[in-house]
Image (tube, helix red, strand yellow):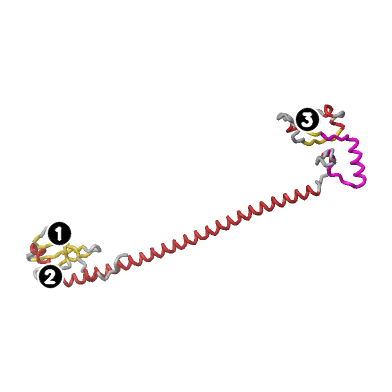
Amino acid sequence: MAASPDAEAALAFEMDKYTPFKSSDVYFDKVHVPNGSKRQDHLDLQLIVVLRERLDAVLDSASQAGHRIDAVDALNDQGQRLNINVLPAARRPANSHPTQRLHQIVAGLSVVLLVSIMLLWVHNRQSALEEMTRQVKALRSDTQQTQALQQQLNGLLDAGRFVEDQKARALSKAALLHELSTCIPANTWLEQLDINQQGTVSLGGQSSQAGELIGKMKACTRLESLQFQGIIQPDSSTGLDRFSLTAQLRIKDDLHASAPDSP
């Protein structure tokens, strides 16, 4: 069994041991004999040997007659082929036997078919991946468009709220001017009136009773959080008290109600 991987070399080396010839005088092949040896470390082989000069003469004669020899087989005791080939490699035709060529063609076609199936599978997977990628891009584009529309809508709503708020403030300022003309005492006049974007109102002027001005201006319903800014100082040129007030402009509920509700 140790020599079985290179049995042909072992047989060629010991040819004179098994036959009356040297390995250089013969062509040979072997056949495994199943259930031959009872020992597990032995392998039984049947050796088939033919003299080179005899086979060479047959091959030369066949070649001269235009015949091509693909293999040289032998028969057993029952007249059945052993399915061997003692034909030397140098004398074997370059092209294999038609049956072998057919097997090779079938094997080649099988390989081509297998590769085609694999390529088709890869192509289908690639097509499916490209379709999924296209769908993802389309969804992403739709999402971006939706977000852009949402931003535009939010911008329009913010702009609408700002316009309504400014409109309400403008109406409140106009109403405040009308109200100040009635709620400020007759002994008082204004030299300064400022209203900033936050609705803070700054009033400055002179009055003969500036200390009582906050109490009397509580009748101004559009002002709240009235308080003096600084101290009251007498004006020597007019004999009146110079004052400075700050207040917060109150936007009337009926005016503010016209603004759109927040979403």
Percent x, y of residue 9: 78, 31
Magenta highlight on residue 66: yes
Q: How many callouts does the rendering have?
A: 3
Q: Label 3, on which residue?
A: 10
Region rendered in magenta: 47-76
Q: Quick check: 59 above or below 180?
A: above
Label 1 element class:
loop
Q: Is 200 in front, or is 3?
A: 3
Q: Amino acid at mark 2?
A: Cys
Q: Residue at x 66, y 51 (%)?
A: 115
The amino acid type of the residue labelled 1 equals: Gln
Residue 124: in sight, yes or no?
yes
Judging depth in this view, the residue of 61 and 180 nearest the camera is: 61
Q: Earlier in the sequence, mark 3 or mark 1?
A: 3
Image quarter of the N terminus? top right
Give x and y (percent) for residue 190.
14, 67
Question: Does 65 sit left or right of 5 as displayed?
Answer: right
Q: Nearer the viewer, mark 2 or mark 1?
A: 2
Numbered mark located on residue 229 in the image? 1
For the residues marked 3 and 2, what is the alpha-carbon distance in whole angstroms? 132 Å
